[in-house]
Image (cartoon, grey):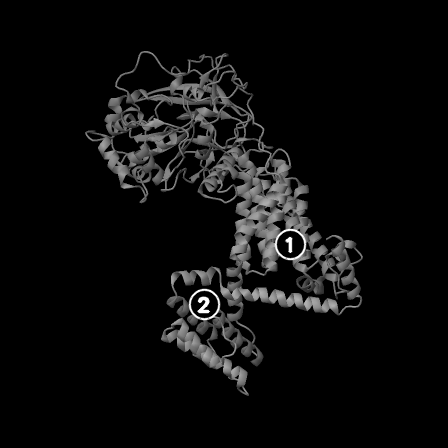
């Protein structure tokens, strides 16, 4: 086995060994078999490309293309062109699966069910890491940097697992890396051997080094020593450094990650899961609660606020974290004249609900919760620290029910300048139609409050908008413009658009994400399910603070301060719970299905099930089918491009720099002449071997209709060829590569579009490959004929051929 083949096999094995660290994160190991098959095909394509041989960048490009075809075939076959080619729909499908996978990772506890999204993330991640390892270690022959992708793969697994990954997985990943280093070659390791192991012994390959401790070459034995030393340091160092919260193997240090006023958080965007939750056929319960609030329809459970709009998405700003105070500070901007009532709410989260942020009624005034939580003052949110999540959490919240009047909101004074600067920023990419529409809708309003109410009513009833959770989700400027044009969307579109329009009017605005109040259960508790996920805008009014608005039709409840009069009866689906706050909230799943009527009519409501993850139904594509389709795709895509690839490689080789001896200079001159001859041939002027270089140059100039620059370049190269062929002491010429490229440019400039396309995709000079193969076959036949006993074997083969027809 050649050295490069050993490298490729070692890179394949190292990637699979590192991928083993992902096994504890998900249910089942079938994905690893699928990843191994795809990784094998990818490695095989790389081996074939290097054997051609192709340029390094082309090799990686072919592998990347084949990888995309494989992922499309396995995960987006129904959306692909001809079932294989990744068209726009297939790429969109892959993007949707990645978004769903990211949500599933944040929702399910370990081990997570193998949903389609998670499967794409783990299988695709392993294949991409394998591509990086193969490119570094095999294509570029640099095995040491290939450890970085392997370390990244292990680190992701260790970071996602509770308590870190097992030491066994680290040893497997490290062993794969050491195997890759051993296979890199004798030359690189021999330099280490002179320092650590003395003089080298008899040459031995990788098999010799793995045969036993006493055998093998010095470089191999040195590699083992270095590997043992590195493993020892990696195992012992995390335990010896108490300043680290966790070591490479996941061991806990004495620190708990808490501190006075320390730490920051760069919030993840929970919107990637909102649409998926709204479209779930089963409204799986995520939490239950009891509250003594008089009007439960106003008890929204808020996760966090998105206060930064950069044109491509709404997201939460990076904020400073503090310890959770016993009593949360007074809400920003809330005055003494506004009616405020404090209520108590007991909340119990399901074990299947795993979120970094703690859902709270807004504004919370006191939170009693166990675990490791930090407080973000600006958004008044609690964030899990050191892996803390809401899974199975039970907590009690004191919160304020703020009930301003319309007169108080209308009389609100100007907000602080600092707050206005931060919360009225809009990106330059925001289409002008957003501000123009905001001005038209709020025409006649005399203050910011009236503008906000007009915006809310326009979205909720007057503007002709339709609530539809199947509309393609989008969070950027173009999505807002599209929503205002098509007037179809769900809560993300309504809240984002109203917040953006409010900012264009100078009203500070942000978007809150969380849950609507939920549904009453038989035992008096209120159940909150996946389909209660919601987003709504919050606008700031001095003297009241951040105030909720509800522009989404048929969702949540319209705030009382935005209605002209308060109705006498409530149309809310939420019945009033018991005022007894001493009862513990029930963690049992709801027996009722809160499916909306629209989904029930469309048959979108499946039978009620226990909370938890649904088992995957897609068993994947058989390995045999994958191999056959990949081979067919390679034949369809690579074979037509093979003349172009050969021609490109030949040009680069001929015009590349060589040695500095006279023989090298002569070879460069003849190679440049061969290049311009083949370039003229590609454009339709076949070479004439009977002509001298000077006459051949004149023929190329005449037939190619070259300009003066290209013609001078041809004659300079022809003169250099005559020097090489006929002069006693040839004078080396400079600039041959530049002259050859100038001739090529002149030929392409004088040729028509069809001739240029033919010369690029189907160069006539590529027939030299066929000639070379024929010559090699003839040479092999002659060599075989000269071997002793060859005639006897040839006669036997002829007899067998006659017997079998």
In the displayed structure image, the side of residue 521 where residue 631 appears, left or right = right
> At which x and y percent is residue 335?
30, 26
Judge whether 751 appears above or below 368 on screen.
Answer: below
Q: Residue at x 56, y 40 (%)?
A: 74
Within-10-Å neighbours for mark 2: few <14, some 14–19, many 20+: some
SS assignment at label 2: loop
Q: Is residue 689 above or below residue 282?
A: below
Q: Residue at x 39, y 61 (%)?
A: 753
Locate residue 707, reporting x and y percent.
36, 73
Residue under pointer 1: 8
Contact, mark 1 vs mark 2 (Cβ under 8 Å): no
Q: Nearer the viewer, residue 406 or 788?
A: 788
Mark on residue 684?
Answer: 2
Residue 388 image-quadrant placement: top right
Locate residue 423, reporting x and y percent: 33, 37
* Residue at 58% from the left image edge and 31% from the top image edge: 113
Tell me which residue sits at (29%, 21%) in the image.
561
Question: Going from the N terminus, do you reach mark 1 or mark 2 first?
Answer: 1
How far apart are the two marked residues, 1 and 2, measured between alpha carbons? 41 Å
**Residue 133: image tag:** none
Q: How many marks?
A: 2
Using the rendered image of the protein, determine whether residue 263 is visible from the camera's viewpoint: no
Mark yes or no: residue 4 visible. yes
């Amino acid at each position: 086995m050649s050295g490069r083949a050993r490298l490729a096999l070692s890179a394949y094995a190292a990637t699979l060994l590192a991928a083993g660290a992902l096994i504890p994160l998900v249910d089942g190991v079938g994905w690893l078999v699928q990843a191994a098959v795809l990784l094998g095909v990818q490695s095989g394509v790389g081996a074939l490309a290097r054997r051609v041989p192709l340029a390094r960048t082309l090799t990686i490009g072919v592998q990347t293309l084949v990888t995309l075809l494989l992922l499309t075939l396995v995960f987006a076959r129904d959306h692909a062109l001809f079932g294989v080619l990744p068209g726009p729909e297939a790429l969109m499908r892959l993007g949707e699966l990645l978004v769903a996978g990211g949500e599933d990772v944040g929702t399910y506890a370990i081990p997570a069910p193998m949903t389609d999204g998670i499967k794409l993330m783990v299988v695709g991640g392993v294949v991409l890491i394998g591509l990086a390892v193969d490119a570094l270690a095999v294509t570029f022959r640099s095995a040491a940097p290939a450890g970085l992708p392997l370390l990244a793969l292990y680190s992701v697994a260790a970071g996602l697992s509770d308590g870190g990954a097992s030491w066994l997985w680290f040893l497997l990943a490290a062993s794969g890396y050491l195997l890759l280093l051993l296979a890199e070659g004798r030359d690189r390791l021999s330099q280490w051997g002179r320092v650590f192991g003395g003089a080298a012994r008899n040459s031995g390959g990788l098999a010799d080094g793995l045969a036993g401790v006493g055998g093998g070459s010095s470089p191999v034995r040195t590699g083992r020593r270095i590997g043992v030393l590195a493993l020892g340091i990696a195992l012992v160092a995390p335990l010896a450094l108490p300043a680290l919260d966790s070591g490479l193997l996941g061991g806990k240090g004495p620190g708990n990650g808490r501190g006075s006023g320390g730490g920051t958080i760069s919030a993840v965007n929970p919107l990637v899961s909102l649409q998926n939750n709204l479209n779930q056929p089963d409204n799986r319960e995520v939490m239950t609660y009891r509250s003594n609030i008089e009007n439960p329809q106003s008890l929204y459970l808020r996760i966090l606020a998105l206060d930064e709009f950069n044109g491509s998405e709404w997201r939460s700003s990076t904020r400073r974290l503090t310890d959770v105070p016993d009593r949360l500070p007074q809400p920003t901007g809330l005055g003494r004249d506004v009616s405020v009532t404090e209520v108590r709410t007991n909340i119990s989260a399901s074990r299947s609900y795993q979120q970094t942020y703690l859902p709270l009624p807004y504004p919370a005034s006191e939170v009693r919760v166990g675990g490791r939580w930090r407080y973000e003052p600006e958004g008044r949110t609690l964030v899990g620290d050191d892996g803390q999540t809401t899974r199975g959490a039970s907590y009690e919240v004191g919160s304020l029910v703020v009930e301003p009047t319309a007169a108080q909101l209308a009389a609100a004074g100007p907000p602080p300048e600092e707050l206005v600067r931060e919360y009225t920023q809009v990106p330059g990419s925001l289409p002008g139609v957003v501000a123009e529409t905001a001005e038209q809708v709020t025409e006649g309003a005399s203050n910011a409050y009236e503008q906000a109410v007009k915006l809310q009513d326009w979205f909720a009833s007057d503007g002709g908008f339709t609530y539809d959770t199947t509309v393609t989700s989008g969070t950027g400027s173009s999505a807002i413009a599209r929503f205002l044009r098509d007037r179809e969307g769900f809560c993300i579109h309504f809240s984002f658009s109203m917040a953006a329009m409010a900012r264009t009017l100078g009203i500070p605005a942000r978007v809150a994400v969380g849950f609507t109040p939920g549904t009453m259960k038989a035992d008096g508790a209120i159940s909150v399910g996946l389909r209660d996920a919601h987003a709504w805008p919050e606008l700031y009014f001095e003297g009241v603070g951040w105030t909720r608005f509800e522009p989404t039709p048929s969702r949540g409840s319209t705030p009382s301060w935005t209605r002209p009069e308060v109705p006498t009866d409530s149309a809310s689906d939420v019945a009033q719970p018991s005022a007894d706050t001493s009862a513990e909230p029930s963690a049992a799943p709801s027996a009722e299905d809160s499916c909306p009527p629209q989904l029930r009519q469309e048959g979108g409501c499946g039978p009620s099930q226990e909370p938890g993850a649904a088992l995957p139904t897609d068993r994947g594509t058989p390995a045999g089918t994958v191999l056959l389709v990949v081979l067919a795709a390679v034949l369809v895509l690579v074979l037509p491009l093979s003349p172009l690839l050969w021609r490109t490689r030949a040009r680069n080789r001929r015009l590349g720099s060589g040695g500095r001896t006279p023989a090298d200079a002569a070879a460069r001159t003849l190679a440049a002449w061969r290049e311009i001859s083949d370039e003229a041939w590609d454009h339709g002027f076949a070479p004439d071997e009977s002509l001298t270089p000077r006459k051949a140059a004149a023929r190329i100039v005449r037939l190619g209709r070259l300009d003066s620059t290209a013609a001078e370049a041809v004659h300079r190269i022809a003169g250099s060829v005559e020097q090489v062929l006929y002069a006693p002491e040839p004078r080396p010429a400079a600039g041959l590569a530049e002259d050859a490229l100038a001739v090529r440019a002149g030929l392409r400039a004088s040729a028509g579009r069809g001739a240029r396309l033919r010369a690029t995709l189907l160069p006539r000079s590529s027939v030299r490959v066929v000639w070379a193969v024929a010559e090699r076959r003839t040479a092999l036949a002659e060599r075989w004929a000269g071997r002793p006993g060859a005639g006897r074997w040839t006669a036997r083969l002829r007899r067998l051929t006659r017997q079998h027809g």
